[in-house]
């Protein structure tokens, strides 16, 4: 925040000119230029809510570990839907920021950026990039509606779908039969989306795409801002990744020499037949959207990456029927007397163009996730109605100890359902299932945020800037007569 608003916060130092004798002893005070105090920053962060979010996030990570998962890190965000104000944002593991003021030891600096300690210096809420998994299916609903699919129709949810020479399996390879699309969202059916996205890929020309393909899924994601930073008033925000046709071509140009040198690498390195085949395929058509790319994209897997803050912005957009705002931590700049120098107004960042019937369907379906779907157990008994979506993202790769990486746990939501005010998202890296790890954590946040009679914001977040009672700093006159000056500096 200091980097972003330094021009407002930094004052102008005063200057005191003194006369000294040849022994550098002050003999007289000549001139005095009064210092100008810097301004103060009021943020949107609520201390009570921030504490609750940090506690819920830490609890979710520990819960993942207790369930046998690696649970190495996490992030959580609470946005005000109608303004984009960031009411709370946490990253885990964290550290004491006063370390920077005291000066870092070598060990402290190493620990901040070490994988062994979880890289506490990484602000995962705005810098961590993760596959959104099934939370992305809300975007796919918008894409399907634009492609002409009837959202009120029933579709098959088989155990798997044969595409080319590969079977794309449903979660746990379980078939649900013919079900409504609402039920498919509630139970998080994957195979339904495999078929729809594959059919659209074929209609767009497959490996020989039309000159102007519809690309409903890519374009819907683009409308939600996937692949772009949110614009939050913090430095070093990650933009995420939208793996559309343009990205594919650029990625191929950067990596084709590596892919097409697979024969030489296979001789020099201990590559498995699987890795060799992957490299060969990427060499041949790595610049094209393949069937597997389209299928994985529809369920938030593959090369798609988002930050937790971006996903919170997406679900705020859904709650707000398509309109989303630039996330802002700053609320106002006030001077030393409490006078408002600058009021940071809400800024519309984008608008997703979709029929109202599509938003109505999404609201109904995301509520079903919580009442009778994958998150029903996690939210049972909650006295406030909320809506959301679970996500369990497969992660490829290994941990430093050689073990396979566990799934990323997500829960993205908004509430209250009838009059949405807040978007709440939690992510736990290597946390396992979305509902049991992050879902429970989000429930705990809502219990603090919306508990009947104990709401943090009983009448919503105040629209006016809170009054600040700044203590006046007493002015002390200092007499420097007789003080010794060494090298131009008063001792």
Image (cartoon, rainbow, N blue to C red):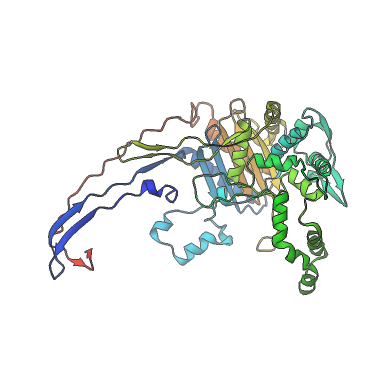
x and y percentages locating residue 285 in the rendered image: 80, 57
Is residue 224 rendered to the left or right of residue 43?
Answer: right
Q: Residue furthest front?
A: 211
Is residue 90 rendered to the left or right of residue 23?
Answer: right
Q: Residue at x 74, y 63 (%)?
A: 256
- How many marks the image carries: the answer is 0
Q: Is any atom of residue 133 visible in this view?
A: yes
- Residue 170 location, quadrant: top right
Q: Residue furthest bottom?
A: 268
Front residue of 34/336: it is 34
x and y percentages locating residue 303 in the rendered image: 71, 51
In the figure, 50 relative to 380: above or below? Answer: below
Front residue of 116/204: it is 204
Q: Is any atom of residue 186 visible in this view?
A: no
In the figure, 203 relative to 94: above or below? Answer: above
Front residue of 362/98: it is 362
x and y percentages locating residue 260 in the rendered image: 78, 65
x and y percentages locating residue 337 in the rendered image: 30, 38
- Residue 133 location, quadrant: top right
Q: Quadrant of the C terminus?
A: bottom left
Is residue 210 rendered to the left or right of residue 334?
Answer: right
């Amino acid at each position: 925040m200091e980097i972003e608003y330094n021009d407002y916060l930094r004052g102008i130092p005063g200057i005191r000119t003194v006369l000294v004798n040849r022994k550098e002893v002050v003999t007289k005070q000549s001139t005095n230029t009064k210092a100008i105090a810097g301004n103060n920053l009021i943020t949107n962060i609520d201390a009570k809510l921030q504490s609750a979010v940090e506690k819920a996030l830490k609890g979710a990570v520990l819960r993942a570990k207790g369930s046998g998962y690696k649970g190495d890190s996490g992030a959580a965000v609470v946005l005000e839907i109608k303004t984009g104000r960031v009411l709370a944002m946490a990253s885990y593991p964290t550290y004491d920021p006063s370390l920077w003021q005291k000066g870092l030891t070598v060990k402290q600096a190493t620990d901040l950026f070490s994988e062994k300690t979880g890289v506490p210096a990484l602000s995962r809420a705005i810098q961590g990039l993760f596959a959104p998994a099934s939370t992305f299916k809300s975007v796919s609903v918008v894409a399907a509606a634009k492609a002409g699919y009837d959202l009120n129709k029933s579709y098959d949810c088989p155990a798997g779908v044969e595409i080319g020479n590969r079977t794309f399996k449903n979660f746990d390879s379980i078939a649900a039969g013919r079900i409504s699309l609402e039920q498919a969202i509630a139970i998080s059916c994957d195979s339904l989306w495999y078929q729809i996205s594959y059919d659209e890929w074929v209609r767009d020309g497959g490996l020989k795409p039309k000159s102007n393909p519809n690309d409903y899924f890519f374009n819907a994601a683009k409308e939600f801002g996937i692949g772009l930073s949110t614009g939050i008033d913090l430095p070093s925000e990650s933009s995420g990744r939208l793996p559309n046709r343009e990205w594919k071509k650029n990625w191929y140009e950067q990596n084709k020499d590596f892919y097409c040198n697979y024969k030489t690498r296979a001789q020099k390195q201990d590559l498995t037949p699987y890795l060799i085949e992957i490299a060969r395929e990427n060499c041949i058509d790595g610049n094209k959207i393949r069937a597997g790319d389209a299928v994985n994209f529809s369920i938030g897997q593959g090369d798609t990456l988002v930050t937790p803050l971006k996903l919170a912005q997406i679900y705020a957009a859904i709650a707000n029927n398509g309109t989303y705002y630039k996330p802002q931590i700053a609320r106002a700049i006030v001077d030393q007397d409490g006078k408002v120098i600058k009021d940071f107004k809400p800024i519309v960042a984008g608008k997703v163009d979709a029929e109202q019937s599509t938003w109505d369907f999404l609201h109904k379906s995301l509520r079903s996730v919580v009442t009778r779907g994958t998150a029903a157990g996690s939210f049972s008994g909650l006295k406030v109605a909320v809506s959301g979506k679970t996500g369990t993202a497969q992660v490829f790769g290994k941990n430093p100890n050689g073990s396979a990486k566990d799934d990323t746990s997500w829960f993205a939501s908004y509430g209250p359902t009838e009059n949405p005010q807040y978007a709440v998202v939690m992510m736990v890296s290597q946390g396992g299932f979305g509902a049991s790890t992050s879902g429970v954590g989000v429930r705990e946040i809502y219990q603090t945020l919306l508990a009947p009679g104990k709401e943090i914001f009983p009448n919503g977040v105040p629209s006016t800037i809170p009054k600040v009672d700044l203590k006046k700093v007493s002015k002390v006159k200092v007499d420097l007569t007789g003080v010794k000056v060494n090298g131009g500096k008063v001792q």
